[in-house]
Image (tube, helix red, strand yellow):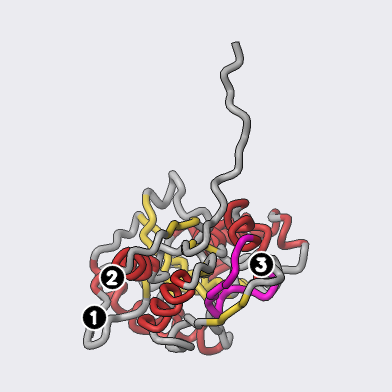
Amino acid sequence: MNTAQPFSHATPLQAGEVSLVGAGPGDPDLLTLKALRRLAEADVVLYDLLVSPDILALANRQAELVCVGKRANRHTLPQAAIHELMVNHARQGRRVVRLKGGDPLLFGRGGEELTALAAEGIRCEVVPGISAALGAAASCGIPLTHRDCAQGVTLVTGHRREGELALDWTHRTDCNETVVVYMGLGEAAAIAGSLMAHGRLPGTPVAVVENATTPQQRVCCTTLAGLADTVQRQHIAPPALLLIGEVVRLYPLLAPALRREAAGLKRHVSPAASTSAAHH
């Protein structure tokens, strides 16, 4: 007897509810089906700077679109003001989508926003999104873990809290794991120096991935010792990730076989990185 239940959509977003939606790493095709439904249901979309126009174009045409900012050192609104906007719109009976790049609960202050909504008794949910680390790894062909060279992966932020002098995570990483640094361009020199001071070799390979998964994606391969110079010389701008570890040596070998490379994604492999990979 067949006991399979027919597929049914999730309950639509209701008046006065807030949905924290992950917009993924940039490519609209990487949105989840639930994220797409929530955008179609929304009365108001409060979106971050990193959300692309192509994704915003998928929202309900009658929805109010409000940019609330969020990029390293560039905030359109203070976080408390974003909380207030969500609460006020929900109390007016509107269906609110808080649209955030990547995943809402990974370096996106989603936890703070959930706490603020819960404190005001606003019903809310989280729609997960593909984080930039996963998107960058897939589009570049750099496996975050690999049986031969990386038994784990650590996701960290390059931002320091106000008043902090050190990046504490740099002494807790291991040479057998990959480190992915979000928002690390401004601290590239400090990150590299601290990692080397705590045992990482100067020749440890690093890939800097700019605009991951989009047609503007660019990959610059370097080493810890050359990271700060590469960021400056290549004029790398946010959004960008730092992928650090032995898995980066696979990039020159695997990237040419990736379908998206043929579609026009920019790539750059420094001669030093290519040579080290070829002789690894």
Residue farthest toward the right in the current orientation of the protein: 263
Q: Is residue 161 left or right of residue 110?
A: left
Few, some or many C-alpha atoms within 10 Å of disc 3 (few <14, some 14-19, many ≥20)? Answer: many
| Marks 1 & 2, CB-CB < 8 Å contact | yes
- Residue 29 x, y percent position in the rendering: 68, 58
Residue type, mark 2 in image: Thr
Residue type, mark 3 in image: Ala
The answer to which of 137 and 189 lies nearer the viewer is 137
Task: Report which residue position mark 1 lands on.
Answer: 166
Q: Is residue 265 left or right of residue 71?
A: right
- Residue 114 x, y percent position in the rendering: 36, 65
Bounds of the magenta segment: 41-54
Residue 270: in magenta span: no
Residue 47: in magenta span: yes
Query: In the figure, residue 56 lies in which quadrant?
Result: bottom right
Residue farthest toward the front in the current orientation of the protein: 92
Q: Residue at x 59, y 69 (%)?
A: 43
Task: Report which residue position mark 3 lands on.
Answer: 59
Label 2, secondary structure: give it: helix
Residue type, mark 1 in image: Ala
